[in-house]
Image (cartoon, rainbow, N blue to C red):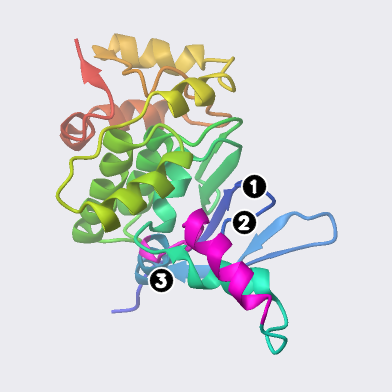
Amino acid sequence: MKKKTAKMIIYCKIGAENFPHPDWISYDKLYNPIAKPVDGDTLFKYLLEDAELEYDQDIMDKLEVEYRKDKKIEDPWQKAFDDSVLLGAPKIWYMCCNEKHGFVSCDKHTELGWRWGGKPIIIIMWLYSIYKHEIISKRLFDILCKEVKFVHDNFAIHYDIRDYLIQKRDHPNQLWCKTYKSKEECDKFHGNVDKTLKKILKKKGFKLSDMESSIGVDKYSEKFFKELLDNKFFIDLNVNEEK
């Protein structure tokens, strides 16, 4: 049976455009994204690939000093960065907790964006839409949702990810605790709360957790949100805390 495909647009602003965006997206002269159709397996692989955005600053500084002594190395800084990269953080993590704007879509029936700060709830909605349109299987959907829940439980903003990876490398048996310093920094950007979404959640008996106190969804279908909230997985993921 032929796999179903959809045009998926993924944009996640980190730093000076450091996020590794999909190779199936190109841009026109006005920098509007143009996406080629992709299947669920391709999307799944992309989302769980290591973003390779984090590095150990101490190791990098030492390596750069050494590499600058070697005249054969054309770019000591880049080589030092490459050799100090911390692995273990998939791309989907950053989509859930970047501190700037972003946008995800699935064809024209689901378009979700955020102005400041990626939110797990937005990515859950997007994944749910992809699953409901049979682009990804229930098994792949569940795996991706577990990654989103992990971000929700452990990171307030993507700056925490580097410290998490270093701790995991140096002290694998030590328990990681979500930091609130980065949460406070993240909250500075969240001035506008989506009142309509909060009203829908309140009617359904949900209380927004601290992480979800400001959603910042630019485009959405109220009918889609209501359908989403009727599904038990949304409660099980603890994206919102029940009263």
Label 1: how many Cα within 10 Å (few below 14, some 14–19, many 20+)? few
- Report x, y in % for residue 242: 19, 16
Q: Earlier in the sequence, mark 3 or mark 1?
A: 1
Q: Secondary structure at mark 1?
A: loop
- Disc 2 + disc 1, Cβ < 8 Å: yes
Q: What amino acid is at disc 3?
A: Thr
- Residue depicted at 60% across the width and 47% down the height: 14
Of discs 2 and 3, which sits in the foreground? 2
Q: Secondary structure at mark 3?
A: helix
Give the alpha-carbon distance from disc 2 to disc 3, as whole Å: 21 Å
Label 3: how many Cα within 10 Å (few below 14, some 14–19, many 20+)? few
Q: Quadrant of the N terminus?
A: bottom left
Q: Quadrant of the C terminus?
A: top left
Tag of residue 50: none
The image shows residue 97, relative to residue 28, as above or below, that is: above
- Report x, y in % for residue 98: 51, 40
Of discs 3 and 1, which sits in the foreground? 1
- Report whether 134 appears left or right of 50: left
Q: Which residue is mark 3?
A: 42
Tag of residue 15: 1
